[in-house]
């Protein structure tokens, strides 16, 4: 019976891993019912490392190359097993292969906005996304901390953990970069470098090396984007108030004309709205030139008279219409028609 058991034993002469491109980070060589032949060969290819585990402890780590396995070339194993130097029988250990290739295009992003501190806006809820690349740098540490005794361990198994590390460190990365939020979009490379510096030590703690990270987009939630747009608009006003007023007046004239025309005045109503818009532009220019002093109030009253034709303001409105006719903005026919409408209010 002992002889039959010996014959049934399978001895391993070559230990190797033909790695497939499926994101596998760690793979345990199948050892069930088999033993490593003393003098066997371990083949570790470029972009791989192999770890021998004996009685639950990492005994040795092998880099790329072809290694002949004997009790003399495995001094750590020999020490653990207390083997005699002349011992030549097969031995059994678990062998794990680790891929040290870069795992590229790993996605990260903020499922929900995260709050950061900003010098301009105070607290800002930020959204961002991009990708990153990493590789196994310390297979012994990765084995003891992450992959353990599993038959295979893939990049997708650790994806959630690494995404969490990225999100956890974004706030600190923004703070350490010294970049204001408004400048983040234009300095995504600097932001990515700051994020790399922040994350690299966290990856090293589990035996990984962060090869690089990209920031492809930085944005605010929609409601805060509207506030940002308003702030940008106010910044434009501060730079050139006169130009901003002229632009606003030009945009307002068609709206005044449309509002007046919808009141049933036809061409005369359109001219009335146009005149009111022009009058508004003149008043804004006068007020701007005068530094918004109180004496600008009469001009504002004139605009109010031109826009709203209340009975008490009929005469002032007629005077304004006369000015518009004199400037050629209103024709005589349009002036007479609007004059007749206003005079009816005096009856």
Image: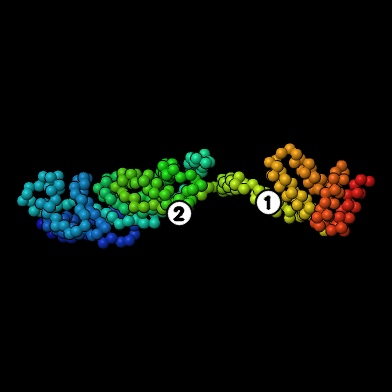
> At 81% from the left edge and 57% from the top edge, which residue is drawn?
328
Dot 1 lies on which element?
A: helix
- Residue 37 is situated, as x and y percent measured from the top left of the image, at 14, 57
Q: Residues within 10 Å of mark 2 (few under 14, many from 20)?
A: some
Residue found at the far left of this picture: 86
Residue 151: image tag: none
Residue under pointer 2: 216
> At 87% from the left edge and 53% from the top edge, which residue is drawn?
338
- Residue 237 is situated, as x and y percent measured from the top left of the image, at 62, 46
Residue 169, compared with residue 66, is above or below; it is above
- Residue 106 is situated, as x and y percent measured from the top left of the image, at 39, 54
Question: Would residue 81 be seen by someone viewing this image from the given angle?
Answer: no
Tell me if 345 is positioned left or right of 243 in this view: right
> At 16% from the left edge and 57% from the top edge, which residue is drawn?
67
Residue under pointer 1: 246
Residue found at the far top of this picture: 294
Can you say which quadrant of the picture contains the N terminus? bottom left
Residue found at the far right of this picture: 347
Tell me if 304 is positioned left or right of 152 in this view: right
Residue 201, compared with residue 62, is above or below; it is above
């Amino acid at each position: 019976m002992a002889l039959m058991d010996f014959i049934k034993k399978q001895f391993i002469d070559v230990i190797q891993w033909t790695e497939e491109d499926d994101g596998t980070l760690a793979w345990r060589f199948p050892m069930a019912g088999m033993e490593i032949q003393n003098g066997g060969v371990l083949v570790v290819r470029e972009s791989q490392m192999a770890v021998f585990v004996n009685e639950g402890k990492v005994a040795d780590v092998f880099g790329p190359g072809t290694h002949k396995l004997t009790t003399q070339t495995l001094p750590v194993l020999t020490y653990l097993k207390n083997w005699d130097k002349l011992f030549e029988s097969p031995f059994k250990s678990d062998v794990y292969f680790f891929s040290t290739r870069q795992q590229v295009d790993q996605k990260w992003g903020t499922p929900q906005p995260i709050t950061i501190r900003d010098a301009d806006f105070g607290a800002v809820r930020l959204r961002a996304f991009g990708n990153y690349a990493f590789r196994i740098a310390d297979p012994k540490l990765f084995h003891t901390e992450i992959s353990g005794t599993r038959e295979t361990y893939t990049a997708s198994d650790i994806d959630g953990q690494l995404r969490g590390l990225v999100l956890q460190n974004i706030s600190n990365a923004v703070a350490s970069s010294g970049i204001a939020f408004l400048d983040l979009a234009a300095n995504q490379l600097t932001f990515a470098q700051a994020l790399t510096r922040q994350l690299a030590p966290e990856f090293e703690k589990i035996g990984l090396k962060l090869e690089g990270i990209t920031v492809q987009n930085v944005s605010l939630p929609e409601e805060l984007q509207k506030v940002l747009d308003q702030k940008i608009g106010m910044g434009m006003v501060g730079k050139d108030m006169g130009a901003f007023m002229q632009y606003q007046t030009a945009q307002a004239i068609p709206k005044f004309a449309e509002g007046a025309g919808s009141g049933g005045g036809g061409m005369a109503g359109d001219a009335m709205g146009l005149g009111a818009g022009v009058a508004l532009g003149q008043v804004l220019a006068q007020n701007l030139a005068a530094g918004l002093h109180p004496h600008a109030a009469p001009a504002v009253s004139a605009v109010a008279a031109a826009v709203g034709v209340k009975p008490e303001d009929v005469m002032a409105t007629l005077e304004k219409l006369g000015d518009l006719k004199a400037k050629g903005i209103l024709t005589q026919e349009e002036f007479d028609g609007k004059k007749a409408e206003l005079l009816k209010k005096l009856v």
